[in-house]
Amino acid sequence: MTLLPDELYAALVTFAARPAVLLGVDFDGTLAPFVTDPMQARATPGAIEALRAAAALPGVTTAVVSGRDLATLSRLTGVAPDEPIALIGSHGAESSDPVLAGSVGTEPDSSADGSVTERLAAVTADLEAVARAHPPVRIEHKATAVALHTRDVDGEVAAHAATAAREVATRHTGVHVLPGKDVVELSVVETSKGAAVRALAAARGVRATAYIGDDVTDERAFEVLSPDDGDLTIKVGEGETGASHRVPDVATVLEVLQTFLRLRTAGQGR
């Protein structure tokens, strides 16, 4: 028995019956509930286990696709380098998959001046100054980006800090603003979760992709996937979206994963 909406359940039945599929899931707000300290985030119990079990089935590729840098994503998920679950970090700029390791979701940026390292150092210095001026906002350092977190910060302070962070991007060439829920990330490479998901699907010979996410950056994945091609897109929470389906929260994401696992294990259409 499932409490999933009828249309979503029917879509899962169809998707689980396809011969070769990719199941991609965002981390924060999708696998893991939001917490004040981003480094304390953990996947809801049973979620990683469901992805591991799905990855062990014939014809199934699973991936966690996140804005977190790859090392942090591995630490928070507990997914080891030799596991079949692919980890894609930094919005697509990093991947644990041996076929895709490197710039899996990086797109060319002809406007950039100077090296990635130089740009990142300059942007980081400016964003750290913004953080010092707007306590208690927090800075998160990544391989090719730096992020300003405002979760649980006074609304007025958070708004001013976010505005200042976006203004930092205007002072540098080759810097891209990735807004999210209570976070403004400044990246020194052009990355896309959509490009990363499509690259992984192509490398694994996948016929259809399911992607679940909650944030603005996940819309880039929704945009490149199509129900006409057998793809399945699911938005977590409220807000405008290009996804075909919606679930309310992290707990329901777990039910989606477990339902897919039950259907696939039962051999639906394989």
Image (spheres, rainbow, N blue to C red):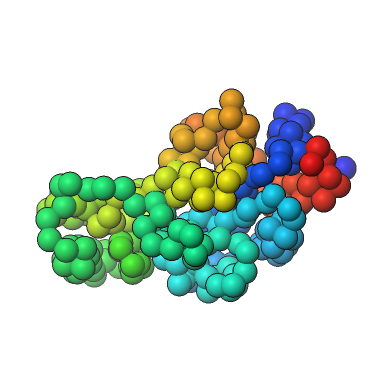
How far across and how far down the image is residue 98, in percent? 49, 64
Residue visible at 26% across and 66% down in the picture: 131
Above-or-below relation of 224 to 169: above
Residue at 54% x, 67% y: name it. Answer: 41
Q: Is residue 14 above or below residue 106?
A: above
Instruction: Please state, as top left, top right, bottom left or bottom right, where the N terminus lies in the image.
Output: top right
Judged left or right of residue 190, residue 214 is right
Q: Position of residue 56 (x, y in %)?
A: 72, 60
The answer to whether residue 234 is seen in the rendering is no
Instruction: Pinpoint residue 73: horizontal percent, then vertical percent.
Output: 50, 67
Taking the spot 76% from the left edge, 38% from the top edge, the residue there is 17
Q: Is residue 201 above or below residue 224?
A: below
Q: Is residue 42 visible?
A: yes
Q: Quadrant of residue 42?
A: bottom right
Camera-nearest residue between 199 and 28: 199
In the image: residue 267, left or right of residue 116: right
Q: Give the residue displayed 68% in from the left and 51% down from the top.
A: 60
Query: Where residue 126 appears, x then y in whole percent?
Result: 18, 64
Please give the count of numbered marks on the rendered protein: 0
Q: Is residue 105 shown above or below 6?
A: below
Locate the C terminus and report the quarter of the image it occupies: top right
In the image, is 270 to the left or to the right of 142?
Answer: right
In front of the other: 205 or 79:
205
Q: In front here: 44 or 86?
A: 86
